[in-house]
Amino acid sequence: MPGTHGDSLPIGAAIRAEPGADGLTVFTKNGTVAVTFISDDVVRIRVLREGQSEPDASWAILPREGAGTKVLVEDDADSLTVRSSFLSVRIARSGGSVTVASGVHILLEAAAFSWESGKPVLRWTQPAERNYYGCGEKSGPLERRGAPMAFWNAEECGYAPGFDPMYHSIPFTLAMDGPLAHGLFVDNTFRQDWRLGELGDTQASIQVEGGALDLYLIATGEPKSVLTRWTDLVGRCPLPPLWALGYHQSRWSYYPESAVRELAANFRSRNIPCDVIWFDIDYMEDYKDFTWHPTRFPDPAKLLSDLKADGFRSVVMLDPGVKVQRGYAVYDSLLATGLFVRNADGTPFVGSVWPGPCLFPDFTNPATRAWWGEQFPSLLAYGIDGFWNDMNEPAVFDSDTHTMPDDVVFDGDGFPDTHLRYHNVYAMDMVRATSEALAKYRSEERSFVLTRAGYAGAHRFAATWTGDNRSDWPSLAISLPMIMNLGISGHGISGPDIGGFVGEPTPELFGRWLQANALFPFCRVHSAKPNWEDPDAPGGAPQEPWAFGEDWEHINRESIGLRYRLLPYLYTLVEEMTRTGFPVIRPLLLEYPDDPDCRNRDTQYLVGRDLLVAPVLTEGDTTRTLYLPAGLWYDFWTEEALDGGREITVGAPLDRLPLFVRAGAAIPTQPFVQHTGECTGVPIEWRVYLGDGAEGTLYEDDGHSRRYLDGDFSRCQLNVEIKDGQAIVKTVCSGTFISPRPAPRVRIINGALVRRPSA
Ligand code: MIG
């Protein structure tokens, strides 16, 4: 472990250097340091031990064209330096330590590479006050200093806040020195252990279990531009279908068919909006992937088409474990192809999960991904809309480590190696297989896939949720920093199990939770069955929006309704994220990096640039204290104008989510609808919150096909100018899509004018 220096082999002094097109390779006593500029503001530093060979392919980094960055090499008595116009990398001749700077700002100071007990380690000196964010899925505070962090996909049912490691491994951090941001990514799929230390600690270290230390540094800039560079490297979320941004209702599990029909009917008769109903593992026969339970669901095609007629989409679960059972076509086929994970001696690895003993497809092999895809047409024929890949850490029941043994072997796309190297990418390759199957067998439609686990870049293939949380207030509170840090890490379409997975929420907890997460890009209620041993035992306490009494039913309807009213704004933001990497759910620091008061705000967030949400996260509270950034804001409900740059306390009765709008924003909204299929029938209602004028954007397309990729979308910019006390509204649109909605309406909220009559 880092912290002990015993048995340490340092990289050693520089012996010679070889310039390359985009960088410099330095050969040291015990290894090499290869510096490659990806662009002017992104540099890769890859350290290999003498004689070590590693695959060229990266799971995270997208292939790119030759960069052709102009670099300059300087060679003096003490060091070798290679620089672009933004970044310099200096390698000390004597000890081989590396310093990376962007102008006068030092990103990485005298970083020392070594192998401790054979494992690559990086130790460096950090500014005492540096803040770190991101780091993927972490169940603690927004700021990541303090307890050590591990990256090793793990499941912990009913995890408590602070539990580590979690399901995802995304070793990327957005670092902030005052207002200056930079990015650091360690591209290594083995387990990683990061020690960033408490605030004030100047020593930091990263140790990996194997492979190379492969660092990417993104130069100093605004935090949002660092996120654009980061997602240039690893890709961005694809645009989901509009229905996936609706409200989702799930539990483990809704069955039989009559229960699903009753659920759907309840939503419509109670006038509570919902787009998606989820089918957890009990829809299958004996938990066998690509089957339906014959008596619980005798006619799935009819059920799904009836649901669709009523505006409901369906998402079903597929786990990686394939039940060992002769005569089960998927098993027979997997066995015949040989595309499964193997023991060290070459025999099939068999592990137990829900179906009992299972084979595990080796998703690291492209041939396996194609085989997996071939199983889809039969399921797609039923009319299923989306797919949920669970247990893909991978989780294994009959194992002390809850996963596969260290020595099982994967193909690795031509670089065979053990579980130690491929554990963290198993889930990512599984959802890659699922999303490739959908692109192939349902090529006209956008796909929706949900994954529990992943490695950096998995957001290219799937949205995610934060796994098996608890029905308690601390778990509600951490849902905010978790989703903010996932968004910084690229996973911008994410949300927790609203109401909590393990346990039963009180009516107040459920209602507050739904308010707090109502605008998260992925908004799903899900909960566990209480008796896991007996699949036929009745479900747990109901967790539907109407399950908590009439008063709460009304409040919950309004929370979901708020989401549907703001859906045009949300969809516009999600589309922006697919091009820029700016997450929809933003910590304040992303928009206000210069304001120290906006730094570590775990209990409030921005939706895009213009909405600020400060939910109630404590039982019994009916007021909320929050920080409004500098400038003028409006209370969304009262439309009162409020001065920012200070803390305020607002009333937050049980039916009120504290929500604020930045003055100067024009927000596209729509009337309350039952599901996204009704959007085309209602107009866009612009709410213009005047500052010195206002502006806003609306993105629209058909909501489901891939035609937007060929320009079939529309992007309208609404501009409001104040001239002689008059508001002049202008709209400029681009793109070929013609909105089927009735003509838009504009409403102007002019608190600013009232306050500043001279404007
Ligand atoms: O071992 O499919 O996190 O959402 O309901 C539990 C049953 C397996 C874990 C998932 C959860 C899901 C449950 N699954």
Image (cartoon, rainbow, N blue to C red):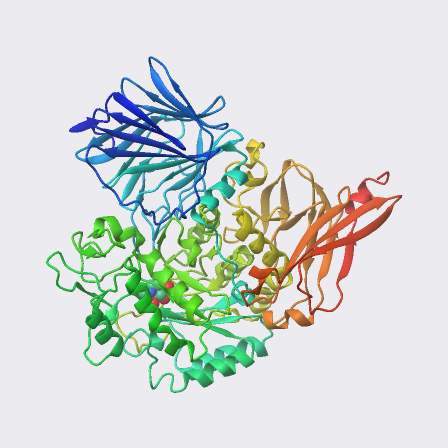
Q: Is residue 64 left or right of residue 119?
A: right
Image side of residue 675 versus residue 203, left or right: right
Q: Is residue 737 above or below residue 9?
A: below
Q: Residue at x 58, y 52 (%)?
A: 576
| Position above or below: 77 against 29 | above
Q: Nearer the viewer, residue 330 or 397?
A: 330
Could you say where residue 160 lies in the image, as x and y percent from the top left? 35, 51
Q: Quadrant of residue 155?
A: bottom left
In this view, the residue farthest toward the top is 77
Looking at the rendered image, the quarter that the C terminus falls into is top right
Q: Is residue 444 visible?
A: yes
The furthest residue to the left: 345
- Residue at figure coordinates x 12%, y 63% from the top left: 347
Picture quadrant where residue 243 is located: bottom right
Residue 638 visible to the viewer: no
* Horizontal and vertical percent position of residue 369: 32, 64
Place of residue 134 in the rendered image (x, y in percent of width and height, measured from the top left): 43, 42
Splitting the image into four quadrants, where does ligand 1 fall?
bottom left
Q: Relative to 19, is 595 on the left or the right?
A: right
Q: Residue at x 46, y 62 (%)?
A: 506
Across and down, in percent, residue 507 comes to 50, 63
**Which residue is most to the right?**
724
Viewport quadrant of the N terminus: top left
In the visual, does 604 lie left or right of 416?
right
Nearest the viewer among 547 and 179 is 179
